[in-house]
């Protein structure tokens, strides 16, 4: 708010730059975030950057962003990180506990861009400390959604969706009465195998699955987009973020990736949010929130685009979507187990140990084998991490047996 005196003098208030920490700074979302921040150096200052094991890349981007501290999850990289930051004044640290400490440094917003369950503890620490979190790391909500939303409520922090579909829906819903929501739809490009038969997909290679038609992303989410498990994870993400039951959530295949999310209301209107497919736009929205942001990239010319297609997903060719939906309906620990098993199956596929169609099968088999764990909804983040480890062990055994 501008003070009356400053306004009378025609002064614009000196606003301190927003301090930002980026967990997973070397990844696709991490580097896109850094490019958004670099465009507005007067508005943002970087506090901490973290990565898994790449000391050289992390040190380079910490220097460029003028971060105060750079942290590697892998302790083996500490000496390299320290050496690469010598003389810069940027502190270095390593190990999983140091990543959690980085997430707890006081800032205006933490960008959660680690991939998979590795992001659970630091992201939960930030939310529990009452810090506003821009969430890309959707596996947090899939593994422990009730705990995260409970922490948001308890601390009054905000969980802002970076995921393009959820960011679109968040913007449609802002200021509206949630009781008037009839249905929420997330769109899916359909991935590289949208038109492939099951016979073709059975022989799909990692290189083919990694060739996404619309988005350039990290390897795990790119494979999730090819199986459509990504949309399954996103339905679960939407369930927690927007507090809607599974039967009010749906997926629409939309190859152009222009419409990201849609909400139908009791008044008969279906509202959609459209933008060019560029993750810098939802990232910028989260970084500036609740102030308006300046979206990245080109603006849409619908006359030029001319055609937007929509269709229902094919559950026979993309069973991952159905498996994720069933896990959401089952509740308890089912989505935690789903997420853990999927991470193991995706890694096994990328390593050439299992075929493409076996990814969804492995996830379903893990849920079946881990049936006695499903009722154990995690009550703490430590329990969520332990369940994830147990589900990984079971999925790992299935992978080993399939070889
Ligand atoms: P990525 O693989 O490009 O980057 C992952 C980041 O996490 C890297 O910085 C890596 O160093 C770090 N990391 C990996 N393992 C770690 C570990 N064990 N401990 C600590 N850090 C670790 O992934 P990405 O594509 O940027 O995706 C990040 C998250 O954002 C995922 O959850 C993904 O589903 C979500 N997301 C990504 C996109 C996108 O366009 N890339 C869009 C929507 C949502
Ligand atoms: Mg998405």
Image: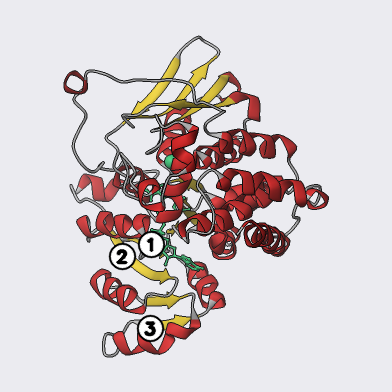
Q: Residue at x 73, y 49 (%)?
A: 333
Q: Position of residue 93 (x, y in %)?
A: 45, 82
Q: Mark 3 touching mark 1, by CB under 8 A?
A: no
Circle 3 residues within 10 Å: few <14, some 14–19, many ≥20: some
**Residue 322 seen in the figure:** yes
**Viewer-proximal residue, 95 or 380?**
95
Quadrant in the rendering for residue 328: top right
Of labels 3 and 2, earlier in sequence is 2
Circle 2 residues within 10 Å: few <14, some 14–19, many ≥20: many
Q: Which residue is mark 2?
A: 45
310 vs 265, left or right, is left
Quadrant in the rendering for residue 225: top left
Which numbered circle lies on residue 20? 1
**For the residues carrying marks 3 and 2, which lies nearer the camera in this image?**
3
How far apart marks 3 and 2 lie (CA) works out to 16 Å
Q: Considering the numbered disc 2 on the image, is that residue within a helix, a strand or a loop?
A: strand
Q: Position of residue 125 (x, y in %)?
A: 58, 64
Color scheme of the displayed model: secondary structure
240 vs 207, left or right, is right
Q: Quadrant of ligand 1?
A: bottom left
**The furthest residue to the top:** 268
Q: Residue at x 37, y 69 (%)?
A: 47
Which numbered circle lies on residue 91? 3
Compared to residue 399, the image places residue 94 above or below, namely below
**Mark 1 residue CB less than 8 A from any atom of ligand 1:** no
């Amino acid at each position: 708010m501008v003070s009356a005196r400053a306004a009378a003098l025609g002064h614009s208030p000196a606003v301190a730059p927003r301090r930002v920490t980026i967990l997973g700074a070397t990844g696709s979302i991490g580097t896109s975030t850094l490019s958004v921040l670099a465009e507005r150096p007067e508005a943002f200052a970087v506090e901490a950057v973290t990565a898994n094991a790449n000391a050289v890349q992390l040190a380079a981007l910490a220097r460029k962003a003028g971060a105060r501290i750079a942290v590697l999850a892998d302790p083996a990289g500490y000496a390299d990180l320290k050496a690469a930051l010598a003389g810069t004044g940027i502190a270095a640290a390593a190990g999983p506990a140091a990543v959690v400490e980085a997430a707890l440094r006081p800032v205006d917003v933490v960008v959660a861009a680690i991939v998979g369950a590795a992001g659970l503890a630091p992201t939960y620490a930030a939310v529990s400390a009452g810090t506003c979190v821009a969430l890309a790391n959707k596996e947090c909500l899939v593994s422990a959604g009730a705990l995260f939303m409970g922490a948001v409520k308890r601390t009054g922090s905000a969980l802002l969706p970076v995921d393009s579909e959820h960011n679109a829906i968040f913007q449609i819903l802002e200021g509206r009465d949630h009781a008037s929501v009839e249905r929420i739809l997330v769109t899916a490009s359909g991935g590289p195998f949208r038109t492939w038969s099951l016979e073709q997909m059975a022989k799909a290679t990692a290189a083919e699955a990694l060739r996404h038609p619309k988005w350039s992303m990290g390897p795990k989410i790119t494979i999730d987009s090819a199986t459509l498990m990504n949309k399954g994870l996103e339905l679960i993400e939407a369930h927690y973020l927007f507090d809607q039951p599974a039967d009010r959530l749906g997926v629409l295949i939309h190859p152009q990736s222009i419409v990201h999310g849609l909400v139908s209301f009791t008044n008969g209107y279906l509202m959609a949010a459209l933008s060019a497919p560029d993750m810098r736009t939802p990232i910028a929205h989260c970084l500036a929130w609740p102030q308006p942001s300046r979206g990245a990239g080109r603006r849409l010319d619908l006359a030029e685009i001319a055609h937007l297609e929509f269709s229902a997903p094919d559950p026979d060719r993309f069973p991952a979507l159905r498996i994720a939906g069933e896990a959401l309906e089952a509740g308890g620990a089912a989505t935690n187990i789903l997420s853990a098993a999927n991470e193991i199956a995706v890694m096994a596929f990328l390593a050439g140990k299992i075929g493409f169609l076996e990814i969804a099968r492995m996830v379903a088999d893990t849920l079946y084998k881990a049936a006695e764990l499903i009722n154990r909804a995690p009550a703490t983040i430590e329990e969520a991490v332990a369940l994830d480890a147990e589900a990984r062990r079971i999925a790992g055994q299935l992978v080993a047996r399939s070889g």
